[in-house]
Image (cartoon, rainbow, N blue to C red):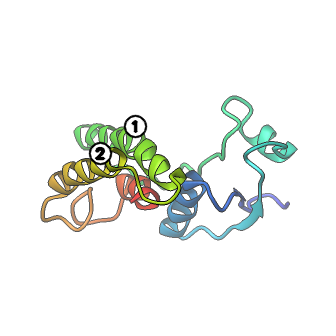
Amino acid sequence: MSKGEVVLLDCWVSPFCLRAKIALAEKGVGYEARAENLFGGKSDLLLKSSPIYKKVPTWPSPSLLPSYASERDKARFWADFIDKKVFDPVCNIWKSKGEVPGMANNEFIEILKQLEGALGEKDFFGGDSFGFVDVIAIPLT
């Protein structure tokens, strides 16, 4: 890998890898995708790139967060909400065999209603432009 070349450690089933792909595409950053086994046997490159969390690292610049502190706080709130409230019900629905359990389905619908209310008439969570919360939400909805 040459200096400046971006390599995306990718796992097809990971919404977090999909987020990284969406963010890189939005920023216009080209990359080489390398398949990664995130469920065991993680590569040396992943462990070296993210030694603390051992997860797919992200590209920090340019920022997809709003420039104003209050708007960044809102974006982080909604990103955290999506991670905590959407991810588990989606996993429960995805893992279910046969008919989706009513409780998981109803929980997911209620969460989507909350997100829809927050989005309102805007095209994007950030208002007029695609941003951080949109990157977080897309793979899980």
Residue 21 horizontal side relative to residue 99, left or right? right
Residue 127 horizontal side relative to residue 88, left or right? left
The image position of residue 109, as x and y in percent, is: 26, 53
Q: Quadrant of the N terminus?
A: bottom right
Q: Residues within 10 Å of mark 2 (few under 14, many from 20)?
A: some
In the foreground, 126 or 107: 107
Residue at the limit of the structure toward the front, as seen here: 98
Q: Is residue 50 above or below residue 61?
A: above
Q: Quadrant of the C terminus?
A: bottom left
Q: Which residue is painted at 54% across and 70% down in the image?
A: 28
- For the residues bearing labels 2 and 1, Cβ distance under 8 angstroms: no
* C-alpha gap between disc 2 and disc 1: 13 Å
Q: Quadrant of residue 125?
A: bottom left
Q: Which residue is mark 1?
A: 84
Q: Which residue is painted at 54% across and 48% down in the image?
A: 60
Q: Which residue is painted at 41% across and 55% down in the image?
A: 100
Closer to the eye: label 2 or 1: 2
The image position of residue 105, as x and y in percent, is: 33, 52
Q: Is residue 66 above or below residue 13?
A: above
Tag 2 secondary structure: helix
The image position of residue 99, as x and y in percent, is: 43, 59
The image position of residue 61, as x and y in percent, is: 52, 53
**Hey, what amino acid is under mark 2?**
Glu
**Hey, what amino acid is under mark 1?**
Lys
Question: Would residue 61 be visible to someone looking at this image?
Answer: no
